[in-house]
Image (tube, rainbow, N blue to C red):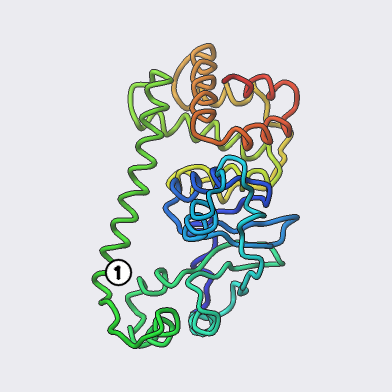
Amino acid sequence: MSLRTYQWPRLVILKPSATVFEAARALDNNQVGAVVVQHQGRAIGIVTDRDLTVRVIGQGLDPQTTTLATVMSNEVVTLPLDASRTEALRLMQDRRIRRIPLVEDGAVVGVVTLDDLLADEAAPLTDFADVVRAQIGEGGPMAPTRLEMQAAKRRASRLDASYRRLMNEFRTESALSSIEQADSGFLVILSALVRRLTADEAKDLIAQLPLRIGERLQSLPAGPDKTITEAAIVAELARRLGVTPPRAREVLDAAVRTLDANVSAGQMQDIRHQLPKELRAVFAHA
């Protein structure tokens, strides 16, 4: 079985100039353990949650100013999407790692982790014994699959909570009547924004959103789509929500305020720099 099933899920990609604070927020929103650092379409590093603890907090560095280039591991081990689960396990054992970015045409398109492979009910636990021994330095017993599945359920619960928290914040800010309306309106706005940005900038934005939202934006066509305008966004919002254009514009402004509160200032600044003058004015509200 190839690793194509792990294309895009739980994928967080940031630039080397992103700060540790931005990475920590992205890890929390997506409930993952590592950030892939990418430059000019190529993976150049990886930063794990342990790196943030040991190399930043342990060294007394400021997370608001320390960049990922400072703390990332430069040797990135990758596999192509067509590699097998056995190849991934062997590489994890040889290099004593728990996660491997997956690449296609040089660009990172997914990540496979030891936990992902463990959660595969079709995989016998004996396949993982050597990997675990290599990483912990002993031959202790493996945890049963049932416990791994319980851990996966807890991660899913945290992902759901992150999504609900953002939707409740937007619903309150926009005065929409339900979470369903908030979800529909927010998705209209984010879809338009992602399509208007370049592919790399869109990925950076998606990385800072809760995974339950980001996973629905991954399949959008790569931008920039110059047909995206303020009028087009307002018209689609009005149609989707069944409201007047002035009310739709209020919802758009509320979405911008919600993004400002939940996406790093540096990321929002990068987004605004890419937008044309008309949309830059729309997304300039703090």
Quarter occupied by the C terminus: top right
Q: Which residue lies furthest to the top in this view?
A: 246
Residue at the disc numbered 1: 148
Label 1: state its secondary structure.
helix
Number of marks present in the image shown: 1
* 100 lies above or below 173: below
* 46 lies above or below 186: below
* 100 lies above or below 245: below
Residue 23 x, y percent position in the rendering: 54, 48
Left or right, 277 with respect to 180, comes to: right
Q: How crowded is mark 1: few (under 14 residues within 10 Å), some or many (20 or more)?
A: some
* 154 lies above or below 221: below
Residue in view at x 39 percent, y 33 percent: 167
Left or right, 171 with respect to 215, comes to: left
Residue in view at x 45 percent, y 56 percent: 32
Residue 20 x, y percent position in the rendering: 56, 47
Q: Which residue lies furthest to the front in this view?
A: 60
Left or right, 191 with respect to 140, comes to: right
Residue 194 x, y percent position in the rendering: 62, 39
Front residue of this view, candidates 239 and 149: 149
Residue 244 x, y percent position in the rendering: 49, 13
Residue in view at x 59 percent, y 26 percent: 233
Q: In the rendered structure, which amino acid carries the disc numbered 1?
A: Glu
Left or right, 29 with respect to 65, comes to: left
